[in-house]
Amino acid sequence: MSRRVVPLTGDVWDRIEAPCRSCLFWALGEPRPSATVPGRPDPDAEAAQVRKQAWATARLHEGRAPGRAVLVDDVVVGFVEFTPAPHVQRRAGLVPATDPTALVLTTMWLDPGHRTHGLGRVLVQEAVKEAIAGDHPAVEAHGDRRWRPDQCVLPITWLLHEGFEVAREHPRYPLLRLEVSRTVRWAESIEHAVEEMWDLLPRRAPRPVTQSVAEAVLSGTDV
């Protein structure tokens, strides 16, 4: 089994088969994708996908990919979407605003068959590496206290488990923050989890020799 992390470019977007591909909830402050009848095209979702890809393309033209994707045997099994705070549309109401200097994690998706194997942590690590490369002091994300598995927003319990801390409270969508200054300690704490992920995933090829997660975060290379 081969696994690699790649930038979230246009050709990768085209290979993602998930409702989150058209989610504009945090990126542009719009409603989540609606459920549709299986096999029936959703014109709203198709229009949202076009807008989402335009938003992602604009980030690419600025020189930074708006996220990363994990490929297992060249199949996209998960992705994380992130961007500097000024590119995220603030939602109306009292939802806590992000720090304008932070890198904001807007959504993440993992194929159900590849969950609980540690790939979510790998994607968070990619967000931290991007924050370091872009000189952002922290990664921020809004958690959802009422999260369900079919949603594109992120569960607060999972974010807390991955090292984020509540920066500003909200009844539904508190703002969570992961300080880049804690990266070394955080990276060392997840290194064993990434090793366990390799042991859990079935593989048909010899396991590659890789550097440690802590070394990868500090050097800016993929693991």
Image: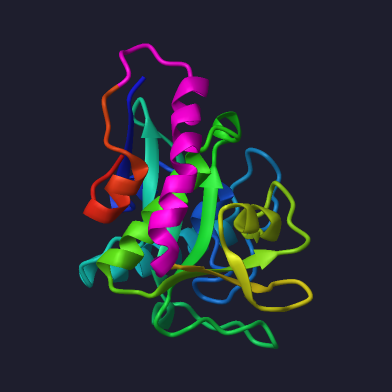
Towards the viewer: 101 or 16:
101
Quadrant (top left/top right/bottom left/bottom right) for the N terminus: top left
In this rendering, is residue 209 above or below 82? above
Towards the viewer: 113 or 41:
113
Identify the residue at horizontal 39%, vertical 40% (top origin). Answer: 70
Q: Position of residue 109 (x, y in %)?
A: 54, 48
- Residue 189: in magenta span: yes
Identify the residue at horizontal 52%, vertical 81% (top origin). Answer: 98
- Residue 129: in magenta span: no
Quadrant (top left/top right/bottom left/bottom right) for the C terminus: top left
Identify the residue at horizontal 52%, vertical 37% (top origin). Answer: 118
Q: Quadrant of residue 195?
A: top left
Q: Position of residue 107 (x, y in %)?
A: 53, 59
Is residue 122 left or right of 131 when viewed as pictured?
right
Q: Is residue 101 visible?
A: yes
Q: Quadrant of residue 165?
A: bottom right
Q: Give the image's coloring scheme.
A: rainbow
In this rendering, is residue 58 above or below 148? below
Q: Which residue, as the protein is rendered here, is positioned at the far bottom?
A: 93
Towards the viewer: 96 or 77:
96
Q: Is residue 50 visible?
A: no
Q: Position of residue 145 (x, y in %)?
A: 76, 63
Q: Position of residue 129 (x, y in %)?
A: 33, 58
Q: Which residues are magenta?
A: 180-207
In this rendering, is residue 97 above or below 160? below
Is residue 220 left or right of 213 when viewed as pictured?
left
The rendered magenta stretch, by its main secondary structure, is classed as: helix
Identify the residue at horizontal 73%, vertical 78% (top origin). Answer: 170
Tally the marks.
0
